[in-house]
Amino acid sequence: MALLLVSSSICVFFANRIIKTQSKAFLFSDVDKIKPVKTGLVLGTSKYLGNGSINPFYENRIIAAHNLYAHHKIKQLILSGDNSKIDYNEPQDMKDDLIEMGVPDSIIFLDYAGFRTFDSMVRLKAIFNQDSAIVISQQFHNERAIYIAQQKNIFVYGFCAKDVSQSLGIGTYVREYFARVKVFLDLLLNKQPKFYGPSVKLIY
């Protein structure tokens, strides 16, 4: 048992270190400093918490996406998330809120099969034919997304939405460490997205 714990700890440590190191130069939180790229990719999460209140991770990602559009840093948006249940639709929630904030419907494209970050990044190129983008999420999430993209020959910057306090997002932050180990297993085993589907033509 002790050996297993030590081995697991080593895997978590090195996975975290590699992903942070490889992604560091591509992360931005100041909209004025990030270079314009034609496509933004918003990574999905649930709009609501279990108690019915708005999920701050979600809210901050929507604000960040709108900020990029308002500052002419992106021309079109892919909203990638989970739509595995009839009454649960992350991409549509994001679209509705962005339209309400003034983002035109015509530049928004929905990826209903972004069940995992790995799926979202692979489908960015395989389905939406984009080999570059600005990925939009919190920094810890962007780090992992950027690393996956690098391994799949996709050039992405990460625009970091406002973080959420450790007390509110402790479960998410803990899961992230194990998700980083899973990235290396996915790459080693040549894991594929759950769904592919037909190609989607964007504006640009």
Image: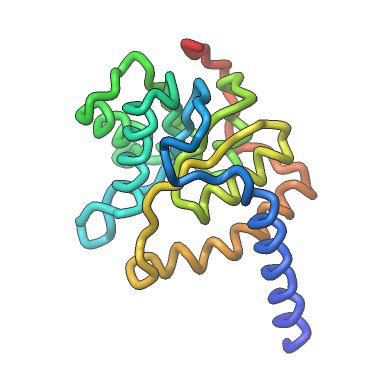
**Quadrant in which the N terminus is drawn:** bottom right
Q: Which residue is drawn at 71% across and 49% down?
A: 186
Q: Residue at x 42, y 31 (%)?
A: 79
Q: Quadrant of residue 128?
A: top right
Residue 23: image x %, image y %? 64, 49
Residue 2: image x %, image y %? 73, 88
Which residue is at the far bottom? 2
Q: How many marks?
A: 0
Colour mapping = rainbow
Residue 162: image x %, image y %? 37, 52
Q: Nearer the viewer, residue 52 or 16?
A: 16
Q: Residue at x 76, y 76 (%)?
A: 7
Q: Is residue 34 left or right of residue 25?
A: left
Q: In this view of the protein, can residue 190 be seen by the observer?
A: yes
Q: In this view of the protein, can residue 82 be seen by the observer?
A: no
Residue 72: image x %, image y %? 39, 23
Q: Is residue 40 left or right of residue 157?
A: left
Answer above or below: position of 9 versus 25: below
Q: Which of 142 and 32 is in front in this view?
A: 32
Q: Residue at x 73, y 40 (%)?
A: 151
Answer above or below: position of 191 versus 95: below
Q: Is residue 109 left or right of residue 86?
A: right
